[in-house]
Amino acid sequence: MELTSRPFTLELRHRFTLASGSRTTTPVVLVELRHDGHTGYGEASLPPYLGESQASVAAFLSNIDFTKYPDPFRLETILADIDALAPGNHAAKAALDIALHDLVGKLVGRPWYDLWGFDPAKTPYTTFTIGMDTPEIIRQKVAEAAEFKMLKIKLGGANDRQLIEIIREVTDQPICVDANQGWTDKHFALDFTHWLAERDTLFVEQPMPKTMIDDMAWLTERSPLPTIADEAVQRLPDVVKAVGVYHGINIKLMKCTGMREAHKMVTLARALGLKILLGCMTETSCAISAAAHLSPMADWADLDGALLIRNDLFDGANIIDGKITLTDAPGIGASLKRDQGSGIRMRDEG
Ligand code: MG
């Protein structure tokens, strides 16, 4: 197998604001894995607050010699070797995992939902994220999101209730709330959760800091809404720690090193009675399509990452009337757009 990669910068449609800061771009690294006339595509998305960068991905990839793996079907061995190279580097590992899955699916000629035995008709609706902003911009963003069956609202700022009230003035779409660890008092969190439940909210993601385990368990026991772990659950061994502390977990390929571990997390979460939210970073339709193959097993999906960018390089899984729609193309089902206008083609830039 032969690996190539290149950095790319995603341009966001709207300035993206979290409690931790705001930005207008997201760096990614795109990878290609070639074998026997087929090309597998992969992507590492690198929001700056998570600590990986295009340089750290390039350094990680430079340690891997794919020529020593003549058989791409040895996924379990290859990905375990890659994981053992260095701790962290979750997005870099995810890029390789996605490319390898894409390649293997193409060699077999089947999409991954088929290989996993999932029914593509059972994909969920996805949320559409409305970032923190001025009331005027929020009203505009909600209007643009009319086709979506549910909205995701990032909280944890000073004007959280006002933000929800602005949204409720303009739409009755159900909302999902992500507090990004913003609430540090369990009584405040429970009070807020009741207030949100009265305003058609589906779940509350990471309401309290991930280290406040006892307080979080107290909240989950009393919460009128499902509580979902995001920052608290990164990889497979974290799933069991969510039992009794949260009602469910948010699985993201960029946190858990890719499709193979995400599939194991889905299986374990189901066995433990945990709800599953499938999430993403801002990503092209490459990584989004990869995640979409797991979505028939999710209770909710938050796979709007490619919709939030202006310069998606790939066609793949679509969102149609708010519902994730898988194609029957083999592998992850993502293909490079033939004409990007600005001349962006993976091979051209080297
Ligand atoms: Mg989150």
Image (cartoon, rainbow, N blue to C red):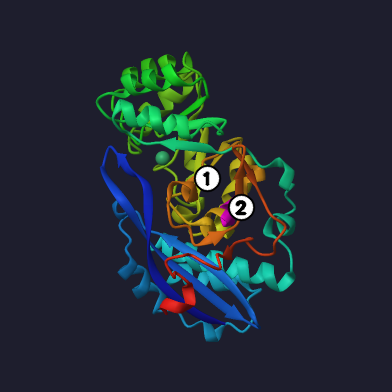
Q: Residue shown at 37%/58% (left/top)?
A: 46
Nearest to the observer: residue 168 or residue 41: 168
Query: Which residue occupies the extreme front position in the image?
Result: 341
* Quarter of the rendering containing residue 323: top right
Name the mark nearer the viewer: 2 or 1: 2
Examine the rendered structure and indicate whether residue 55 appears above or below residue 294: below
Would you say 309 lies left or right of 98 here? Answer: left
Ligand 1 - quadrant of the structure image: top left
Q: Residue 100 in the image: state x and y as whole percent.
A: 58, 70
Label 1 neighbourhood size at 10 Å, few (<14), some (14-19), many (20+)? many
Residue wearing tag 1? 303
* 43 inside magenta stretch: no
Name the dominant secondary structure of the magenta segment.
helix
Looking at the rendered structure, which numbered label has been put on residue 198? none
Q: Where residue 317 is drawn, which disc sits there?
A: 2
Residue 317: percent from left, percent from top:
61, 52
Cβ atoms under marks 2 and 1 closer than 8 Å: yes
The image shows residue 286, relative to residue 71, as above or below, that is above
Residue 327, position in %: x, y?
A: 69, 55
Tag 2: amino acid: Ala
The disc labelled 1 sits on which kind of residue? Leu
Q: Mark 2, residues whose alpha carbon is within 10 Å: few (<14), some, or many (≥20)?
A: many
Q: Which residues are magenta?
A: 289-293
Location of the C terminus (image quadrant): bottom left
Kindly state the secondary structure of the residue where label 2 is placed.
loop
Q: Secondary structure at mark 1?
A: loop
Q: Quadrant of residue 110?
A: bottom right
Q: Is residue 26 left or right of residue 292?
A: left
How far, Cα to Cα, is label 2 from label 1? 10 Å
Give the residue drawn at x 62%, y 50%.
294
Between 346 and 5, the one lying in front of the other is 346
Residue 24 visible in the current orientation: yes
